[in-house]
Image (cartoon, rainbow, N blue to C red):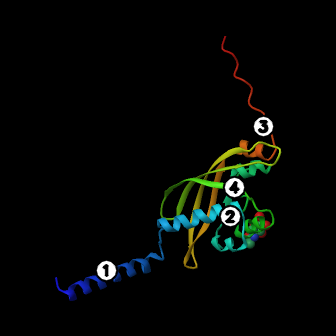
């Protein structure tokens, strides 16, 4: 093959890539490095909030929905605890979670959603810390030419979490004996 043919091929290939990304703005998909960035930011946000993390929260359509959080907060369920970015950023800015969350497993993920499993071992003294395991699904939103966290759905071991905060729960009564 002649050099000119190779150059034509190379030009064709890069034009094809450009074409994909230009069209892709309508339906852009996460790649592995995007997933790593968003999962890393989610962890950072929960570990120790910093104002610049707000840039990674989508402006439009953001929500954080968690029946576990509503239950711990003593609220009814069925609605997002933070229905928009302002509410979420406001909460994190004034009362950051500061949870030592570690990521146990990332995936599965697809075009614009990421499932992850996490652990967090913490407690308010004098309580012995219990490990809390949780599952989060991050919705990803491509906004202003970057991937941002577009939504958070999270459920976790709220019994252990409640214990870590100094709360208590009463186990159910034993089953009736069969004799
Ligand atoms: C954001 O959510 C809060 C409730 O937490 C609500 O009071 C506020 O009006 C909402 N703000 C916008 C801009 O929708």
Q: CA distance from mark 3 to mark 2?
A: 29 Å
Q: State the image coordinates of residue 81 (x, y, percent, origin top left).
A: 73, 58
Quadrant for the N terminus, please. Answer: bottom left
Q: CA distance from mark 2 to mark 1?
A: 39 Å
Tag 3 residue: 169
Residue 45: mark? 2
Residue 139: mark? none
Q: Nearer the viewer, mark 2 or mark 1?
A: 2
Q: Nearer the viewer, mark 3 or mark 4?
A: 4
Quadrant for the C terminus, please. Answer: top right
Task: First in sequence, mark 1 or 3: give its number.
Answer: 1
Q: Nearer the viewer, mark 2 or mark 4?
A: 4
Left or right of residue 139: residue 170 = right
Task: First in sequence, mark 3 or 4: give its number.
Answer: 4
Task: First in sequence, mark 2 or 1: give its number.
Answer: 1
Q: Residue furthest left?
A: 1
- Which image quarter: residue 176? top right
Element carrying mark 2: helix
Q: Residue furthest top?
A: 179
Q: Is residue 162 above or below residue 63?
A: above
Element carrying mark 1: helix
CB at mark 2 closer than 8 A to ligand 1? no
Tag 4 residue: 100
Q: Tell whether label 3 touches label 1 (CB within 8 Å).
A: no
Q: Is residue 146 above or below residue 44?
A: below
Q: State the image coordinates of residue 155 (x, y, percent, origin top left).
A: 65, 50
Tag 1 residue: 13
Give the residue at x 21% y 85%.
Answer: 5
Is 163 or 30 nearer to us in this picture? 163
Element carrying mark 3: loop
């Amino acid at each position: 093959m002649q050099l000119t043919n190779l150059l034509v091929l190379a030009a064709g290939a890069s034009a094809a890539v450009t074409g994909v990304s230009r069209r892709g703005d309508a339906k852009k998909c996460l790649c592995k490095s995007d997933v790593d960035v968003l999962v890393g930011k989610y962890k950072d946000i929960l570990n120790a909030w910093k104002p610049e993390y707000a840039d990674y929260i989508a402006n439009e359509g953001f929500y954080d929905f968690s029946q576990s959080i509503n239950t711990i907060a003593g609220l009814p369920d069925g609605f997002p605890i933070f229905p928009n970015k302002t509410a979420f950023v406001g909460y994190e800015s004034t009362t950051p979670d500061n949870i030592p969350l570690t990521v146990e497993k990332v995936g599965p993920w697809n075009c614009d959603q990421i499932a992850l499993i996490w652990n967090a071992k913490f407690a308010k003294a004098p309580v012995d810390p219990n490990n809390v395991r949780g599952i989060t699904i991050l919705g990803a939103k491509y906004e202003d030419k970057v991937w941002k966290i577009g939504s958070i759905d999270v459920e976790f071991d709220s019994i252990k979490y409640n214990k870590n905060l100094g709360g208590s729960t009463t186990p159910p009564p034993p089953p009736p004996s069969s004799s």
